[in-house]
Image (cartoon, rainbow, N blue to C red):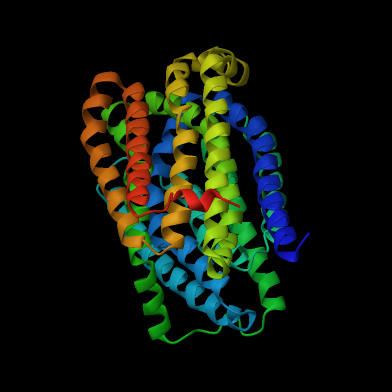
């Protein structure tokens, strides 16, 4: 086996192991929190997380895709420079966002609007953690083992704290804190370890380099912002049109489906830098790999959807109890999402971005956001959380279909590429 293949297998194994163990932890933790806190408190946390997802979005600025691509194409001697470039670009945005969030909530508190400042502070530690934890660097240099060790250790400690401290619905702030703080701990530890391995890692680059990083990430940032319009905003709109209890039932179903989506994301994170490096040497080999990945995703996604739909009642009752039976129809609809999202990730986030079709990728997602905006208000108003779930499926299905059509017209599915 070649070193390249061995490294890819190690990266995929590391990321999948991380998500598999996270899944086990979630299997224990998510039902516990849903049952202990109840739909209303879970909905309150989810509603606040929906708002804070905008803060994380601005801070990330698409660097989770542009930075690994730059690192995968670079020589090891350039790693320190590229790290400092994207690290400081991220932290400048983080400082600006933190100030803005502080001002907004200070105003809300001053005018006596309902603003749970303690829940905000608890959940905002996760935003800071995402800012400090340079997952994009480990992805780019294809060293995923460190992510696995650091993330799992912090999450395990977090889970233990939740089981010890969170005993009733009034402990929801502690629940929010212990769910968010692992990424902050992981970020701090990773920066300490990286500083010992690479010299001059935190040297402040010139502003020209930082500005270039913003220019490189602009299209991806637009794409990410649009994605958030039909993911994070979905819960916010549902909360505005209904109440925290309905949001809680929706969140329960979404969190269970999220376990599968995190597994898919782990595979994509490990594979993406490998694809960039392979396409740089052999385009047809890279495309064959992408086609094989797409086929596996379609088969596995279909199996997962069928199983989840057939046994939805049993899954919800077994994991969450009778209190969440209203989540069953929502869960059945959202079960289709892993299939659609896994396919769109290969077609868009991997194939289109690997060939630097950033502008087309961004426009497709903007079109998806328009579909989502047009559908979510009437469907949610009429059918509540079920309508919100259908909005997600319609949006993701439209995006996946359009990506496939665009790539087909551009000749990415030529028959000769399937020949060995």
Return the x and y of residue 376 as percentages of the image width and height.
26, 32
- Residue 292 versus residue 55 in the image, above or below: above
* Image quadrant in which you'd find residue 210: bottom left
Task: Pinpoint residue 341: horizontal percent, then vertical percent.
Answer: 45, 40
* Number of numbered discs visible in the structure rendering: 0
Residue at (51, 72) in percent of width and height:
70
From the top left corner, tell me how far across and down residue 120 is, in percent.
44, 48
Q: Nearer the viewer, residue 377 or 288?
A: 288
Extreme residue toward the right, this view:
1
Q: Is residue 392 left or right of residue 296?
A: left
> Residue farthest to the bottom?
206
* Residue at 52% across, 40% down: 173
Q: Is residue 133 visible?
A: no
Tell me if I can see residue 399 in this picture.
Answer: yes
Up-down: is 196 above or below 128? below
For the N terminus, which image quadrant?
bottom right
**Residue at (49, 78) in percent of width and height:** 85
Of residues 107 and 394, which is closer to you in this image?
394
Residue 327 position, x and y percent, is: 46, 20
């Amino acid at each position: 086996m070649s070193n390249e293949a061995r490294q890819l297998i190690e990266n995929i194994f590391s990321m999948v192991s991380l998500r598999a163990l996270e899944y086990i932890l979630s299997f224990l933790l998510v039902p516990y929190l849903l049952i202990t806190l109840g739909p209303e408190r879970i909905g309150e946390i989810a509603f606040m997380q929906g708002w804070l997802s905008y803060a994380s979005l601005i801070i990330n600025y698409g660097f989770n895709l542009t930075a690994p691509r730059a690192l995968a194409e670079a020589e090891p001697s350039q790693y320190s420079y590229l790290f400092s470039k994207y690290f400081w670009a991220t932290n400048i945005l983080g400082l600006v966002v933190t100030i803005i969030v502080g001002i907004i909530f200070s105003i809300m508190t001053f005018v006596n609007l309902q603003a749970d400042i303690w829940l905000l502070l608890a959940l905002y530690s996760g935003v800071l953690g995402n800012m400090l934890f340079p997952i994009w660097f480990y992805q780019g240099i294809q060293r995923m083992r460190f992510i696995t060790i650091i993330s799992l250790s912090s999450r395990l400690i977090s889970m233990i704290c939740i089981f010890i401290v969170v005993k009733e619905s009034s402990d929801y702030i502690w629940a929010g804190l212990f769910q968010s703080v692992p990424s902050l701990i992981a970020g701090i530890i990773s920066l300490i370890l990286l500083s010992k391995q690479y010299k001059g890692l935190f040297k402040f680059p010139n502003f020209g380099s930082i500005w270039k990083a913003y220019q490189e990430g602009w299209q991806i940032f637009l794409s990410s912002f649009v994605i958030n319009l039909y993911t994070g905003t979905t819960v916010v709109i549902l909360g505005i049109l209904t109440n925290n209890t309905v949001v809680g039932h929706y969140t329960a179903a979404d969190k269970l489906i999220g376990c599968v989506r995190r597994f898919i994301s782990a595979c994509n994170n490990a594979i993406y830098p490998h694809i960039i490096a392979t396409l740089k040497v052999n385009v047809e080999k890279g495309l064959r790999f992408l086609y094989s990945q797409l086929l596996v995703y379609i088969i596995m996604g279909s199996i997962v959807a069928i199983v989840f739909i057939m046994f939805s009642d049993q899954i919800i009752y077994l994991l969450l109890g009778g209190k969440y039976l209203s989540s069953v129809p929502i869960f059945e609809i959202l079960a289709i999402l892993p299939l659609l999202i896994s396919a769109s990730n290969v077609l868009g986030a991997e194939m289109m971005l690997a060939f630097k079709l950033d502008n087309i990728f961004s426009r497709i997602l903007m079109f998806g956001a328009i579909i989502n905006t047009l559908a979510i208000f009437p469907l949610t108003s009429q059918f509540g959380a079920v309508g919100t779930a259908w909005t997600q499926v319609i949006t993701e299905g439209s995006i996946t279909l359009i990506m496939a059509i665009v790539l087909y017209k551009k000749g990415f599915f030529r028959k000769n590429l399937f020949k060995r």
